[in-house]
Amino acid sequence: MGGALALTLKMLTFKKDPPISSRPQTSKLVKAFTAEPADVSPTTFMQGRTIALNKIEVYSEVGGRLLPQPNEFRAGVRFNKGQSLMRIDDGELRLSLVAQRSGFLQLLTSTLADINIDFPSSYETWKAYTSNLEVDERIPELPSPKTDQEKFFFSNKGILNQFYTIRSSEERLQKYTVAAPFSGEVSQSLVNPGALVRVGQKMGEFVSFNEFEVESALSAGALNVVMVGDPVAFTTMGTDNTWSGKVVRISESIDPSTQSAKVFCSAKGDGLRDGMYLNGEIASASIANAVRVNIDLLTNGNTLYYIQDTVLKAMQVEVLYTSGVEAIVSGVEPGTKLLKERINNAFDGMPVKVSDK
């Protein structure tokens, strides 16, 4: 029996183990595109609110009753540059000015005889000035004295003092009419015709209606290509309107919390209003010999996968520009097959098959 057991053990030692077959690797079905480096124009997307380029608060420098006029100072009413926004009753000051000019005319008339004796060469000039002086019109500029003695003479007579007192009143008279400093519309009105206006009282707000700025923030990556002067196309939700503009200022400071900088763009055109939210596309100068890819395809910030034969290969590229959805890179050879969509758990050497769809 022992011999039989030994024979059985010997036969088992000659039995071969069955061969172990390796599990075949399946190829991942992927989508790809053939990269052809060319001149690529970066498009940077931005959002922001319109701010009227010209926006002022209107205050009264004089007091009095607000007069009615054809175009009343009310919210939504438009005025052209130089047109009267509002008028305050100036009747009392006008009568005071007539009285001042009359007194000045009387002073000059009484002084002409002395001028003829002391300064005969200037007599005709002052006589003509006195003759042309109208009490209902703005006082003309005084003739220039020929000598210091002549200047001292007119000063001692009180002529210079009265002249500049009248000029001061005339300048004040102009403040009773508030003219539009630019073409725009009333955005806020705090007074009504007939109301008594006090000195320093706020009357309302006036904004331009055709020139605006849009403030937004751009990422540090976009700041590499966006330049002052780049054109911008604006749109807004709910309408088919488009407006044009350009980049006018870029802040030199970077917000440490968002790593972005403020950019200011001009915007103009019919239909714009102060406070509107706009979407903008900034078209920057083209970048030579570059490829545009979806930003999700970048791994570790600067690595792209391409297809060589039937496997994935990793390559490092130079990222020239990034936005929220795309990146522009260089360092890709013409004809390289790049992935068109991101693959989870991709690795160098991964077997793939390019989809025909």
Image: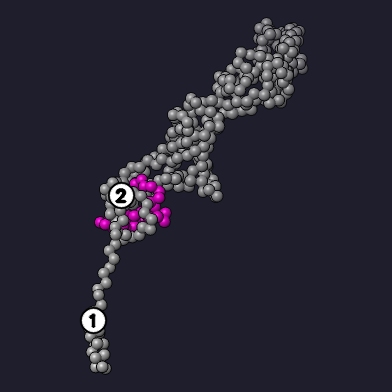
Q: Nearer the viewer, residue 138 or 259?
A: 259
Q: Which mark is residue 145?
A: none
Q: Nearer the viewer, mark 2 or mark 1?
A: 1
The residue tagged 1 is: 15
On screen, residue 262 above or below 21? above
Asked if residue 225 can be seen in this view, the reply is yes
Q: Mark 2 vs mark 1: which is more N-terminal?
A: 1
The reply, left or right, for residue 134 in relation to residue 300 is right
**Residue at 27% from the left image edge and 72% from the top image edge:** 20
Q: Nearer the viewer, residue 328 or 160?
A: 328
Q: Secondary structure at mark 2?
A: strand
Q: Position of residue 81 (x, y in %)?
A: 56, 20
User: Does the magenta run of residues contain 309?
Assistant: yes
Asked whether the beta carbons under mark 2 and mark 1 sit within 8 Å of each other, the answer is no
Q: Which residues are magenta?
A: 291-317
The reply, left or right, for residue 328 in relation to residue 12 is right
Count neighbours of disc 1 (C-alpha within 10 A) and say few if under 14, some if 14 to 19, many if 20 or more. few
Residue type for callout 2: Ala
The residue tagged 2 is: 32
Count neighbours of disc 2 (C-alpha within 10 A) and say few if under 14, some if 14 to 19, many if 20 or more. some
**Residue at 30% from the left image edge and 48% from the top image edge:** 33
Q: Position of residue 147 (x, y in %)?
A: 68, 18
In which quadrant will I find the N terminus?
A: bottom left
Asked if residue 333 can be seen in this view, the reply is no
Q: Position of residue 214 (x, y in %)?
A: 52, 35
**Residue at 37% from the left image edge and 40% from the top image edge:** 41
Residue type for callout 1: Lys
